[in-house]
Amino acid sequence: MDSENTIVEFAVDWSPTVRNNRYECSDVKLTNDYYQPILAVIQTIKGQTNKSKEIIGRIRKLEALPVIDKRKFGTITIS
């Protein structure tokens, strides 16, 4: 996946019931320049995480600071 000039795209389809707290951007494209930094973060987090948890439900609300540069975390409400 380190091939030059490659792109990974993530797309989101919002549920029609989600009206508030919806971000206007529905896709993210990452070039190969991001692969190694993301892999390094994943390996760091995996080293610190011992548990996995599966949560089944619907996302009711997403909350975070409105200014992206100041975001450190967010809250997800699931029902």
Image: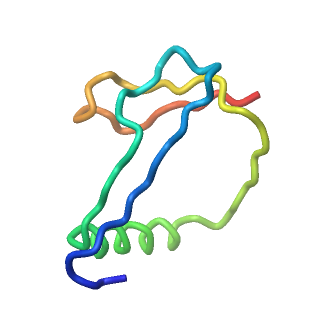
Direction from residue 17 to residue 35 in the image, left or right: left
Residue 32 x %, y %: 25, 73
* Residue under the point 64% across and 19% down: 17
User: Can you give x and y, in whole percent of width and height, for residue 19 in the image?
Assistant: 54, 15
- Identify the residue at horizontal 53%, vertical 27% (top origin): 62
Q: Residue at x 22, y 35 (%)?
A: 69
Is residue 46 placed above or below 53 in the rendered structure? below
Q: Is residue 74 shown left or right of residue 31?
A: right
Q: Position of residue 22 (x, y in %)?
A: 46, 23
Image vertical order of residue 78 relative to residue 38, above or below? above
Residue at figure coordinates x 30%, y 83% from the top left: 2
When asked about the image quadrant of residue 31, the answer is: bottom left
Which quadrant would residue 41 be assigned to in this image?
A: bottom left
Residue sitting nearer the eye, 46 or 3: 3
Observer-nearest of 40 and 1 = 1
Q: Quadrant of the C terminus?
A: top right
* Left or right: 59 in relation to 8: right
Say left or right for 5 vs 61.
Answer: left
Q: Quadrant of the N terminus?
A: bottom left
Most foreground residue, 25 or 76:
25
Specify the quadrant of the image occupied by residue 4. bottom left
> Tell me, what colour scheme is on the image?
rainbow
**Residue 46 higher or lower than 60, as above or below:** below
